[in-house]
Amino acid sequence: MPGPEEERRRVPEPRSAPGNATAPDGTGEPRERGAPEPGAGPGAGRRATRTLLITGAGGAGRTTVAAASAVAAAMRGRRTLLLSGERPATLEAVLGMPAGALNGAGGPGGSGGTGSAVPGTDGLLHAARTDSAEHFRTAAVALQERGRKVLDLLGSDPLDEDEVTELPGAAAFALLSAVRAAHAAGSWDTLVVDLPHTPTALRTLALPAQLRRYLRRLLPAERQAARALRPALAQLAGVPMPTDALYETTARWEGELADVQGLLESPDTVVRLVAEPGPLAAEAVRLGRAGLGLYGLRLEAVVANRVFPSGSRDPWTASLSGQQQTVLKAWREEYEPAGVPVREVPHLGSEPRGAGDLLRLAAAEPAPGNGRTGAAPGTDGAVEDRLARDGLLVWRLALPSVRKEELELVRRGDELMLGVGPYRRVFALPSALRRCRVVGASLERGELRVRCEPDPALWPEGTGR
């Protein structure tokens, strides 16, 4: 059997030649020269980027699994960027890099945009850490500059960049901005993102859609049509009206958020849930899958980390292995019929260090495009027409792993608010359902069915029911 070093020497050359139309992209299929893949987002028309989002329970080894996934992609000849928002030097240690090597390395949100090359990967793998403090300072100062006229009228004393301290939540925006910048660069075949633990990660991934909704509610686009009337309205009302600069800023934010949302919902973006198999991890994995389904994100695999070998003669190791195999069997029975494989990452007996150890962890990982992956739950669901038979329209939404007792459902105007445990999402009702009353709902086999009855006061006359 060849060792990690011999396997590394067999790595194909990176796809750096311009106009390469047949370089492998993980599926073995050729690509049209210069043609973008679906959902490419910013930088469409350049190199399509496959994105792996790695999250899981705290202490489950997310960073190690993310690093192993990135090394595996690089060893297949794919130019890969590993992006992390973790502050400690954990990532450097796992990659076999000196402490602090990723600080100021020119991450995707910075000037360089290339990160630092990881030893032992022939320059195919780069890693970068987002600097949330720097990102927040830069954004805050830029916003202050755009609003300088208003601040001057108010007699405000502008803040200097060195006295701006990041606020809670800044790390989420920095990470999303870095993901968008990495895609816009068009330089990477694979982007691996080391996300925080699952609840924080899902709230981060839900931000673009939530903020776009807030912008639409607070500053509706149709109000921009009244620009010519603003001076007159300001005189009549006696208060200042929104300026063009405000709407221009809103439009820019909307565009950037739409880019990130498109990237997250792209068929090229998948999520891997990491957990150490044990009795306490089962609920965290289930709830994580439920949250992903609520937000319409694709779960590619459940990664069981630090799995002990079976058949050990040591009683302690054998006992732990037996417990893990019991949990793994239950996970396979629950998730694999739904198209979500359970992948095992072995326990090496020590903390992994460097590309060689990471290759051992990733040895059983299938190439992208091989094996089964979880299908997208569907962002907006589908409406079933049962008017002729039951006088109802049924809105069907995929909600895998959700239990009835934790589901909350509230109709408010033209929106439906769904809650699953700690997660919330607001759905805009399809146009036909806005003229209906919600008369009931049921949750069966991972699918929510909302029954809606046409409202006689709103339903078009003469329409069959």
Image (tube, rainbow, N blue to C red):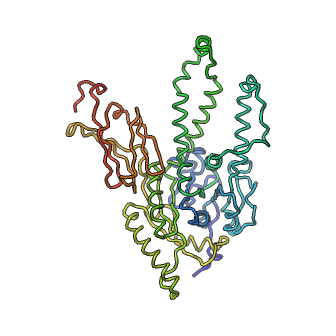
The quadrant the C terminus occupies is top left
**Residue 443 in the image: above or below residue 253:** below
Residue 118 visible in the snapshot: yes
Residue 270 percent location from the top left of the image: 51, 55
The quadrant the N terminus occupies is bottom right
Residue 348 percent location from the top left of the image: 59, 77
**Residue 411 in the image: above or below residue 203:** above
In the rendered structure, the answer to whether residue 380 lies left or right of residue 140 reads: left
Q: What residue is drawn where x is 48% and y is 49%?
A: 423
| Quadrant of the rendered image containing residue 457 | top left
Q: Residue furthest left?
A: 389
Residues 166 and 224: in front is 166
Q: What residue is drawn where x is 62% and y is 79%?
A: 3
In the rendered structure, the answer to whether residue 269 lies left or right of residue 100 reads: left
Residues 268 and 237: in front is 237
Residues 262 and 445: in front is 445
| Quadrant of the rendered image containing residue 166 | top right
| Quadrant of the rendered image containing residue 338 | bottom left
Q: What residue is drawn where x is 79% and y is 43%?
A: 162
